[in-house]
Image (spheres, helix red, strand yellow):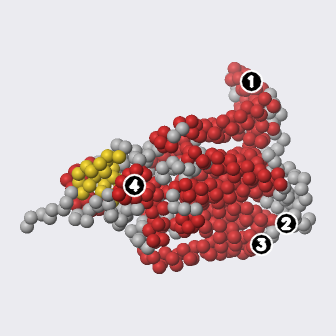
Amino acid sequence: MHEDDATSDLPVTSPPSPTGSTPRPAPSISRRDIAWLGLVCLVALLVRLPFLTMPMIADEGGYAYATRGWLNGTGQLYDDLWISRPQGIFYLYAVIFETLGTDVVALRLAAWISACGTAIAVWTIARRWQPQPVPAIASLLFVVVTGSPSLEGYTANAEMFMMLPSAWCIWTLIKAAETEWSAHWLFPTGVLIGIATMLKPSGIVMLPVGLIATFAFTRSEGRDWRIPAAWILAGVAMIGIPALIHGWLLGWSDFIYATVTYRLTMQSSATVGVSHHLAAIGRLILRILPMLILIICVTLIAHRRDILRVLSMAMRAIPVHPVREAARKIQYMIRHMGEPPAERHLAVPGDRIGMLLRLWVLASIFGIAMGGDWWAHYAIQIAAPFSIWFAEIVRAAAASVRRWLSRVIAAATVVVVLVPYWVIVLGSTEAMSNRLFSHPGYQAQDEIAAWLRENSEPGTPIFVAFDQAAIYYLADRPPAYRHLYDQELRALPGSYSDIISIIRSPERPLYIVSTRQPGPYPDASRTFWQEVGQYYELETMIDGIPIYRAREYNPPAL
């Protein structure tokens, strides 16, 4: 392992550090470091600036709508304000409303602040693991990747906020290992895991990371693992118990159904088939394909020594002379790329931070898979450990080849990371929205919401068929059906009949907004639109989006 020049903050008799059997000096923070972190935060803002006023996405709209109704007392969480998330995201949105504002720009500035806080954690962890330039590369890579429009990284999605406590719980765990498993660091580790879980349920994957690492590290030191693990669990309980009490006060069955039961039984990785997983993974791969190709190429260069070893073993096992000659040529080309790396940090025995990174990556993949849909913004969960790991791979690859090739590696990394931002050249927000969003009507939602406010009284129910929950928030009109997303409508077996019954009833919503989507039902929602045709008439068109108004109710003759 490399050693930094700064003086250690640990005594000579301290226990093994997370980087190995010998304590690694903890470098002091210089003005240059502070300046670099300021630059990283500035870059994080600059890459998000073109997207601050992009249309509010469905997730942002749903969180904002539920939070406003909860704060105003016009609804109750997990009843008419129904979203399958714990309370954390609503508390966070409430803080944003009270401090930064209630519009989409305020939400996305909050996401930028979260990204900056996480970037500092990434830099801190990478700095404790490897010397420069790895921390610098990791922090800069992180803010650019997480701001990527292909991952909806500029939005105020739950993943953007969950990654902040997830990253810092890794740092507190490292500090706990360096301070003889002090409760002063273990308890905050659990608290941060609890906060991450309250922001998004997949944050719970950080709990096994903490417990497994604690078990492995303490056992290697001959310590009892149970007390450190208990402190972590106590920290989680510090957050979880108040949430459960609050859920009990709201209505225990509604709370548990929304936050646990629904996901496990209706919308999770376990409730969808293999074909669904494969299709969703395929879509995600297509979105990040350039990055995947770069990762594979750079990793092969950094680990070519191992590749050469495998090729040598294969040559000895191949009797055919032409094939062996071809293998020798390949081996010669790889060898002459440059001197092979002298060390491999991810494989160093006793490298505790390296082990934590591997656990963190595996946990993040599991967290991405939990929902079963593999949405692009789910990939943000892995951005922090990936940035640290890939920064070291890039450094190792560039340092082990000739100068011209190291420059090619650096240039390729910069280009591939920035490729998703090409949409900026389209200029206008509308043009970028048309390119990024597959939902018709996203670009017109502000105008639609303004029209609904002008043509209906406050509290008048509307129905958006079948997604784009942001319209409910922007129009400040309640939904006629409490489930806001087409995924929920698809998952709940009785949702179709419920909606049709609402359309037929005297209390039907005044307006129905079409998003020009086929809908989540097997008949492409034809039955729904047939009912709309009987009870509604076209009122107006806004940028090609039809809005239907309910006809006057005529009770059937006796």
Is disc 2 placed on a helix, strand or loop?
A: loop
Indicate which disc, 3 or 1, sits on the residue closer to the N terminus.
3
Hey, what amino acid is under mark 3?
Ser
* Mark 3 or mark 2, earlier in chain: 2
Marks 1 and 2, how far apart at CA: 49 Å
**Tag in front: 1 or 4:** 4
Helix, strand or loop at label 3? It is loop
From the image, state whether disc 3 or disc 1 is nearer to you. Answer: 3
Q: What residue is disc 4 on?
A: 449
Q: Inspect the image, locate mark 1, and give the three-letter code of the amino acid beneath it.
A: Lys
Report the side of 53 relative to 441 (left or right).
Answer: right
Residue 15 is labelled as 2
Residue 438: percent from the left, percent from the top? 44, 43
Q: Which SS class for mark 1?
A: helix
Which of these two is toward me, 157 or 176? 157
Q: Position of residue 128 (x, y in %)?
A: 79, 56
Answer yes or no: is residue 369 visible.
Answer: yes
